[in-house]
Amino acid sequence: MKLFIDSGNIKDIETLVAIGIIDGVTTNPTLLAKEPGDYRDNLRKICQIVKGPTSGEVVATDFEGMMREGRELAKIDEHIIVKVPFTKAGVKACKTLSSEGKRVNVTLVFSPTQALIAAKVGAYFVSPFVGRLDDIATDGMQLIEQIVEIYDNYDYTTQVLVASVRHPIHVVQAARMGADIVTCPPSVYESMFKHPLTDIGLEKFLKDWEKAQAPAGKA
Ligand code: E4P
């Protein structure tokens, strides 16, 4: 399963990419609006750091505007994936941009039928938002299970990108269900690295080693 970072913060992205576990980045208008500087320059920098799929989202809501912004975003870097919201205009833009050879991520997906439609118009990624469904007392991960099953039934090549991830359990469930990608905010990576037994175990190994190195009688 591929691991993406859900952030527009250059420092956070640099830090996580340096560890060697990151395959790509997702951004959205909310994330990019938090960062200083021109969003195009920031997206270019992110692409250069991660050297993998980097989603940049259109903000136009009409088909023509989405096409214009999508084509501009795609020019920023070869790694850019054009992100469009799941609306009629977004679905039409996905079909047209995909036919031009651009890779499209259909975002704000909350139902299996939306995911089915995204696959039919050639989306490269589909982004179901699990955390936001959990927030309204609906099981977000059940949606992932349904999408993976539907895509498997018909051999759709659209990759399932699990978004709106809030904690490591989402990651575990996504991996067990066979989702292609999870995109996590830096805080979720922090939680995935932390385990008290790892810390306790390492401390004991180092203490025992230190004791053995001390001159006889001084331990
Ligand atoms: C990813 O593509 C989405 O933009 C993101 O995961 C949304 O997450 P949120 O629901 O935590 O804002």
Image: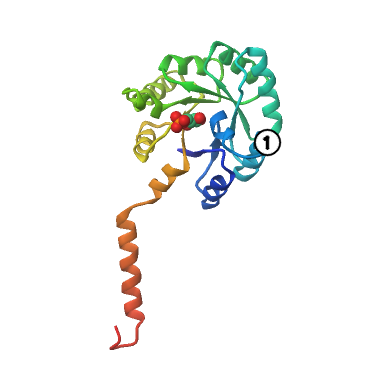
Q: Is residue 179 visible?
A: yes
Q: Secondary structure at mark 1?
A: loop
Instruction: Return the residue nearer the eye: 63 or 112.
Output: 63
Residue 1 vs 60, above or below: the answer is below
Count the labels in the image. Answer: 1
Where residue 123 sits in the image (x, y, percent)? Answer: 55, 21
Vertical position of residue 63 compared to residue 201: above or below: above
Question: Where is residue 179 drawn, in percent x and y?
Answer: 42, 31
Does the closest atom of ligand 1 sit within 8 Å of the Cβ of label 1?
A: no
- The residue to which callout 1 is attached is 38
Q: Quadrant of residue 42?
A: top right
Q: Quadrant of the N terminus?
A: top left
Residue drawn 35% across and 76% down?
A: 210
Which one is nearer the viewer's eye here, 116 or 40? Answer: 40
Q: Is residue 25 left or right of residue 217?
A: right
Residue in view at x 31 percent, y 55 percent: 196
